[in-house]
Amino acid sequence: MKYNCVMTYPIYNREYRGALCGWIDGDRYTHAIALNTDRELTSKKLHDIFGRFTQEFDRSVLDKRNLVSLLPERRLRAIVFPENLSTNAHLHGVADFSIAMQRFDDGLLCNGRQIKQTSLEELVRCIWLQSNRGAGSIMLRANPDLGWAYYSTKKLSHQFYTTADYFSR
């Protein structure tokens, strides 16, 4: 008896991407986000920059230096997918900025400068530039849909970063 074996990777990849997008869509993120570095980077370097961004964002919003003892639900929640590392490294993904938006009434600081009330985009831009040594740009859109999840994963290589990667820091 002869067996015909067929590689199922493309189907697996499509199923994996669909499941990942469904998870993102159902997880109630407040914003679609794109973080651009304007340069070529390794995956590790981009991971480190995103780590600095999440740490500084939490420190700014929560007004704490030591974040290790904080409950994860009090911290920034995001998932991002790296793209074009060899040309213009950037991240597409989603983030839950609800904690930050609640804190705007108290006033927030970035680099010692007061951020205007309800200016989430200004706060994210300031912290991204600080984390990325002054380079790059950001894009924020409220209420991301399933289409954004599929767009974010268009170059999926089974690699993504979540803010939970940095909770022990």
Image (cartoon, rainbow, N blue to C red):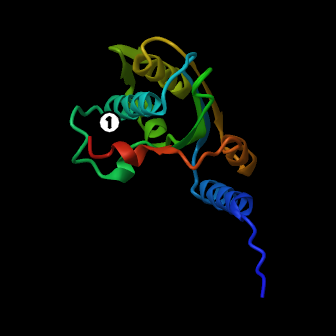
Number of marks in picture: 1
For residue 151, side relative to residue 88 (left or right): right
Judge the density around disc 1: few (<14), some (14-19), many (≥20) Cα neighbours within 10 Å: some
Say which of 73 and 106 sits in front. 73
Q: Residue at x 48, y 33 (%)?
A: 43
Say which of 5 and 92 sits in front. 5
Return the residue at label 1.
62
Q: Quadrant of residue 106?
A: top left
168 vs 44: above or below? below
Say which of 130 and 64 sits in front. 130
Q: Quadrant of residue 65?
A: top left
Q: Position of residue 130 (x, y in %)?
A: 41, 17
Q: Position of residue 37 (x, y in %)?
A: 54, 20
Say which of 23 and 7 sits in front. 7
Specify the amino acid type for callout 1.
Leu
Taking the image as drawn, is residue 78 in sight?
no
Taking the image as drawn, is residue 69 in sight?
yes
Task: Please state, as top left, top right, bottom left or bottom right, where the C terminus lies in the image.
Answer: top left
Give the structural element (helix, strand or loop) at label 1.
helix
Task: Please state, as top left, top right, bottom left or bottom right, where the N terminus lies in the image.
Answer: bottom right
